[in-house]
Image (cartoon, rainbow, N blue to C red):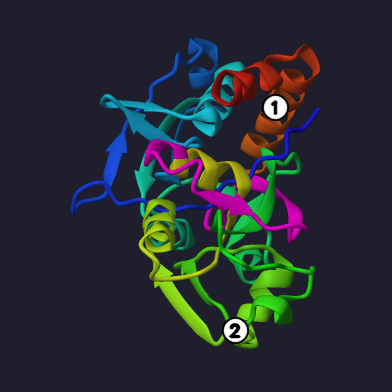
Amino acid sequence: MRKHFPCLHVLHAVSKLSVCLALLLPLAAEAAQAGKKGQLVLVAANSMPTAYFDNGQLTGVLVDVISEAFLRAGYTVTIKLEPWARCIEDARQGEVDGIFSIFKTPERQAFLDYTSQPIITQTVSFFVLKNAPIRFDGNFASISHQSIAFINQTSYGPRLDEALKKNVFAKQHHANSAESVVRMLMAGRVEVIPSYRHVVLFTAKSLGAQDQIRELSPEVESIPSYLAFNRKRDYRQVMADYDKALKSMQQDGSYDRIFDRYLR
């Protein structure tokens, strides 16, 4: 059973440099000899609780899912954490093999091939300060006059992305990470932030602010999010192996157990 979980796509620069940590998994000798399996370099945004550092160790619910899937598939994987805009550009240029987790958009499909199995389904909602007299009726016009902060290069799903293109929101601000937009909300610099539900709640908790924000209802939408590979090389076999492994994780319960470890 797939979990509804917002991911993905949130940014966090650790220091002035992009951070990365190799996560090495065993590689079957026969697979290496066959030449069909090998080492992959994947990139993700540094975002709690999906992919982040905890006491210097790379961790996160999606890091664990990806790692287990490729372990089962017989690949060695290196995971790098970078600002989301850099993740997108590295995938576009073929500097990395793949990127996670990422929504499907027409623009991205021009340079990315997506796995058939979503890694998660992400719920996008608006968040405000707990006592703010702001209501959302499902129509963006109801909050279009509020100041709002978005994360650079992030897709929030078809509905909200289209609204941004049409400049529905008059007072737009931009930041590079989930932590940044939460801090902007807490400081009163903006009145509304859109986010993937569990990302913003986990981020607020890490800042000691989980009791100071609330989610507006209804949610904007729930969207499947994927692992995708650059189109400069042929990854069809890799994607087939990954999809098979991920499906086996969902069938034997290990997929749910990984999510439960982080979200219970």
Comparing 152 with 91, the one in front is 152
Question: Which residue shows up at 27% across the image and 43% down it?
Answer: 19
For residue 227, the mark is: none
Residue annotated with mark 2: 145
Q: Within 10 angstroms of label 1, few (less than 14), some, or many (20 or more) residues?
A: many
Q: Is residue 141 magenta?
A: no
For residue 246, the mark is: 1
From this view, report whether residue 89 is shown above or below residue 263.
below
Q: Position of residue 22 (x, y in %)?
A: 33, 29
Question: Which residue shows up at 36% across the image and 28% down it?
Answer: 58
Q: Residue 201 sits in which quadrant?
A: top right
Q: Say left or right for 122 vs 76.
A: right
> Which quarter of the image is occupied by the C terminus?
top right
Which label sits in the foreground, 2 or 1? 2
Looking at the rendered structure, the kind of residue marked 2 is His
Q: Position of residue 177 (x, y in %)?
A: 40, 56
Comparing 176 with 246, the one in front is 176
| Magenta span | 205-233
Q: Position of residue 81 (x, y in %)?
A: 37, 43
Earlier in the chain: of badge 2 and badge 1, it is: 2
Looking at the rendered structure, the kind of residue marked 1 is Leu
> Which quarter of the image is occupied by the N terminus?
top right
**Element at badge 1?**
helix
